[in-house]
Every structure is written in structure tokens, then in C-alpha cells.
Image: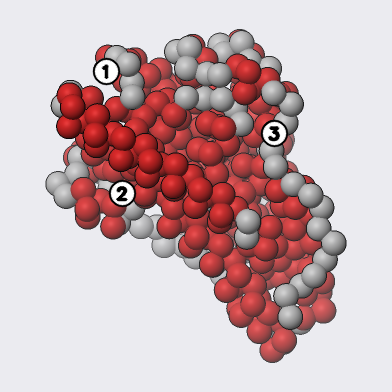
Amino acid sequence: MPFRIPRPKGLTSQIIFAMILGLAAGLILNDIGGGGQAQKWLTDGFLLVGGKIFISSLKLLVVPLVFVSLVCGTASLDDITKLGRVGGKTLGLYLLTTAIAISIALVLALLIQPGAGFNLPTDVTFTAKAAPSLVQTIINIFPTNPVWAMANGKMLQIIVFSVLLGMAITLSGEPGKRVLHFFKDFNDVIMKLVMMIMLIAPYGVFCLIARVFADQGISAIAPLAKYFFVVLFALLLHVSCTYFGLLALLGRLNPIQFFKKFKSVPMFAFSTASSGATIPVTLENVEHKLGVKNSIASFTIPLGATINMDGTAIMQGVATIFIAQAYGIALGVDQLLMVIVTATLASIGTAAVPGVGLITLAMVLNQVGLPVEGIGLIIGVDRLLDMARTAVNVTGDAAVTCIVAKTEKSMNMTTFNKPNNLK
Ligand code: ASP
């Protein structure tokens, strides 16, 4: 029987309600389930199916949405040189915010010392995968086969192809106009599909959250409480100081208004732990609630979801210091600078799916000569932190998008200032 509960009105309130319900259900299951058959049936049956269907439904939107939206966005740019300027500004801001994020993480971790006096467990191991080289990463951005790129969800390749196609449409005169007309109609249809899938969001969110807490409980946090809360604190500080500060200073935008309109998106990101799967929701919100023009958002949001991971960088900064302290290794200033550089690169290379930030952390640890097995220490709380850092990752994408759009006069301030129109 489908669960019938009195539901609050409006998608945001329904999602909050589903999260609280999921948290409670998960903790109860974890507490009374005792790992028995009934608990297994619920977590690996009902909750797993519900959560997976929701995530798949979001993911199925990503490639068609990014492709169609970005073709429309590029083709409707009044001036192609604007693309270069927008690209430069966006990349610059993405890099800047990531570097600030790691610096905040390092300073806090050095002050609070989450790893001091830590008793190292001996039975945890972690095998790192080799990171691809920088040269290969750059070559990989350019697709040889756009269909392959789409089938394999290679976001940067899809971005390159869509931008080129959009430019060709602009330069093609009448035939280009006809093709653009089709893409614009297609874009409207896909947006409709996004709205349809949003209808199941509260159920999906409930299943995802309940499963995490049924599996983990909150007992995993206890031995790592200091590390856990330093990461959370750094995430919070980054959103409230860096993003809100930059929005106000560079974008001349009211950060409170930004957050009021945007807040349902970090909730999606929190539940799915994937900025990639959240792209449809971010894009829809930024364009229709915050008033950013499609020509900017269709480019900056998928790009940000792929390369801009401030939350991940924060986790990597705190984790590096934590592991160094836990192993009693002191890091010098040059090593700390190296952490800033490599964690920025590592977060760029982190795929927008759950848990990858922990894998690319190996790159950072290798670079400064820390034991990669240290990752085993923090695995226990990583799922929960993954949810929180993904929420920050998507907020960063949207904040930078708003700043770029505002400075490019591509933002509808009436939409931005309208009282919360989230439904
Ligand atoms: N889950 C993160 C994201 O999708 C990546 C990570 O830090 O593992 O944004």
C-alpha cells in the first residue's frame, strides 16, 4: 500500500518533510532493525528501489537537457565573442571560489586540529586508483564522437559539441533559424519532463535519506565527530562568507533573496549526493526562479557541475590536515600551498557522482607524501559529508552563474526579486 501521510503544500516544504521523515525512519530502522531480514528487505528492497528510480529519472534528463539547452543558449547569444568573455569570467570565478574554499578548510583544520591525538585503527585499508594525467584530461575534453560522449555522459565533451553546434546554427542563416526553432521547442518539452519528474521527488528523497541513515545510523560519527564538524563548519562558512560576499560585492545581488529562491536545490543535491544528477533541478531553478538567461545558465551550470566542486575541495583540505595530524606528520607552508593547488585540480577532476571526492583525495595525499591509507580513517562518515558537500557544490555553481549573468546584463531582476515563487 502506498504510504499516505498528510503532505504539506509546495515542493520545497514537501521535500523538507520527506527529509525529516526519511531521517526518522532511517534512524528507527537502524536502531530496531539489528541488521535482520526485515531491515534488509526494507533497505535493500523498498528503499533501494525507490531511491534508484528517482536518481535514474533525474539522470536520464541530464544529457538531453544539457545538450538541447546549451545549443539553444549558444545559438541565441547576440554576439559570439560574448561566449569567450562569459567562459573566462566563469572559469576565473570557479577557480577563485575553489581556492578560497580550500584555504578556509586548511585554516580551520589547522586551528581546530581534528586529527590530534587520534588513535589509528589498523584494520582499514584503501586502494587508490591512479588519476589521469593533465595532458590526457585536456585531450579528453574534445569529442571524437558526440554520440559516444552522450551515451557515456562525458559532460565536458557534450559541452564542447553543443557550443560548436550552437555557433554553427547562428552562422547558418535561414537553415540555422529552422534548426534553432526545433531545438527551442524541444527545450520546452524537456523542461516539462523535468517538472513531471519533480512530482516524485519527495518520495525519492524519503527513500534516499532513510536508506543512508538505516545503513549508517549516527554512531559512525562519534569517533570522527571533530573531523565531521570541522568539514560542516567550513562548508557553512564558505557559503555564508564567500558566496554571499561575492554575490553582494561582485553581483550586487541580495544573498538572502538568492538563498530563499534557491534553497530547494541544495536539498536535492543533499539527498542525491550527485551534482550531476541535480543539473536539471539547478538549471530549472536558476533560469526560472532566479531569472538568469538561458544563454548563460545553460553553459555555466553543466560546466560548474563538472569542474566546480568547492564542497569537495573543503572536505579534501580538512581531510588532508586530519590525516597528517592523525599520523603525526607536520606539513610545511610549501606543502600547504601544494594542497591548495592539487585539491583545486582534484576537485576539477572529481566526477559529479557520489563518493568520488574521496577517490581524488588520494591524488592530494600522494602529492604531499601522506599515507593514502589514511582515507580509510574517514570513509565511515564520508557518505553523510558527501551529501553536505554536494549541496555546497551546486550552490557554488548557482552563485557564480548569478554573478556572471548579472555582470553580463543577462539577468531578469524582476524574476529574481519576485517573492519566493517556488511551488
Ligand atoms: N558527490 C559530489 C558531487 O557530486 C562529488 C564528491 O565530492 O564526491 O558533487
- In percent of width and height, residue 128 lies at 40, 57
Q: Is mark 2 within 8 Å of ligand 1?
A: no
Callout 3 touching callout 2 (CB < 8 Å): no
Identify residue type, mark 3: Asn
- For the point 50% across and 60% down, the residue is 57
Q: Earlier in the sequence, mark 3 or mark 1?
A: 1
C-alpha distance separating marks 2 and 1: 24 Å
Classify 10 Å Cα crowding around label 1: few (below 14), some (14-19), many (20 and above).
some
Q: Given this view, does label 3 or label 2 mark the residue nearer the observer? A: 3
- Per the image, the residue denoted by label 2 is 154
- In percent of width and height, residue 300 lies at 42, 30
Q: Earlier in the sequence, mark 3 or mark 2?
A: 2
Classify 10 Å Cα crowding around label 2: few (below 14), some (14-19), many (20 and above).
some
Classify 10 Å Cα crowding around label 3: few (below 14), some (14-19), many (20 and above).
some
Q: Which one is nearer the viewer's eye here, 178 or 336? A: 178
Q: Given this view, does label 2 or label 1 mark the residue nearer the observer? A: 1
**What is the image's colouring?**
secondary structure
- For the point 37% across and 19% down, the residue is 86
- Per the image, the residue denoted by label 1 is 80
C-alpha distance separating marks 3 and 1: 32 Å
Identify residue type, mark 2: Lys
Q: Earlier in the sequence, mark 2 or mark 1?
A: 1
Callout 2 touching callout 1 (CB < 8 Å): no
